[in-house]
Image (cartoon, rainbow, N blue to C red):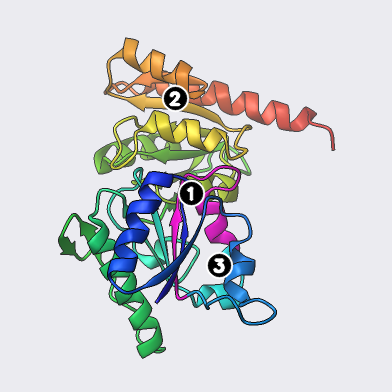
Amino acid sequence: MHVLVVEDDDEYARLFVTVLTKEGHTWERQATAFGIRNRIVTRGESGQLAPVDAVVLDLMLPGLSGESALEILARDPACRRVPVILHSAHLPSLAPAHDTPHPNCLTMPKGVPMAVLVAELERISNARTSSTTTPPQTRTIRSNVVLDEPSLSGRVRPARIMGGRTEPRGRVLLLDDSEVVRELVSDELQSRGYEVVTLESPIGMTRMLHNCKPDVVLVDVRLPGMSGDRLVEFVRTQGVKDARIILYSDTDAAELAQLARNCGADSYLTKSSDLGPLMALVAEFTADVRRGAQHAPR
């Protein structure tokens, strides 16, 4: 198996390719995601380059994120056939393939032992070559434990439009791993005329931001695999500038204020059974965003 390793951490890459070599695999490594599509679809003019059997792609890369690179690969039929593991210290466990734009992709945190990662590469590569009709079993990896896992894809909840209104008051993206919080907050927002998209995991966050173009984003701080403030800091580097982002958490207010300032969030709010202050802030930010869109140059 020949593996393309896309990783900007020199030390981690060195350790990983050592394990690949020990297991009898060949590899090549690059520190950015630029050009990986071209590398996958060609072996070079004289055939000097080995065909890529699998890709290990870091999520947080300079210039072009791993998630954005994955979307590029997903649009190319030749690249869609090559298994990809989206790999980062900021990912919670393993996401099913249908939760990413690439049909042969898994996600795995760097906390997983490298030998397990190599074994998973071998499994998905062998599954690709041995069967073209049966999709590989969806699995979740936490350390050495393998479990089944349901879809983590976003859920769109339409607005309840009343009082003569013809369209939603606004669109809100809510990221929280608590099902109770997602249900309570989204239900209240829907009752006020907002369309709500909910996510329980940071996986797919940047893609969802670009696809659904929310006016307001509510982000919990305590998330599996990646803290909310780190996630906000990351998505701001991916060109997400129009949406207003609110850190919404049960974290201490003083700490939450500091996190919001540091990560580039527009505001913060401590969770409470009284949703009034949250609704008021969402309404204010939605109005600001929509006013700005109306006056933007066309």
Given residues 140 and 161, the one toward you in this image is 140
Q: Do the residues labelled 3 and 1 touch (CB within 8 Å)?
A: no
Given residues 64 and 148, the one toward you in this image is 64
Residue 95: horizontal and vertical position, in percent?
33, 59
Residue 195: horizontal and vertical position, in percent?
50, 43
- What residue sits right under mark 2 in the picture? 279
- What residue sits right under mark 1 in the picture? 158
First in sequence: mark 3 vs mark 1: 3
> Residue furthest toward the left?
145
Q: In the rendering, which numbered label is found on residue 111?
A: none
Residue 294, placed above or below residue 38: above
First in sequence: mark 2 vs mark 1: 1
Q: In the rendering, which numbered label is found on residue 74?
A: 3
Neighbours of disc 2 within 10 Å: few (<14), some (14-19), many (20+): some
Q: In which quarter of the image is residue 117?
A: bottom left
From the image, state whether disc 3 or disc 2 is nearer to you: 3
Q: Which amino acid does label 2 sit on?
A: Met
> Residue furthest toward the top?
254
Secondary structure found at label 2: helix
Given residues 157 and 229, the one toward you in this image is 229
Residue 132: horizontal and vertical position, in percent?
41, 88
First in sequence: mark 3 vs mark 2: 3
Q: Give the range drawn in magenta.
A: 53-72
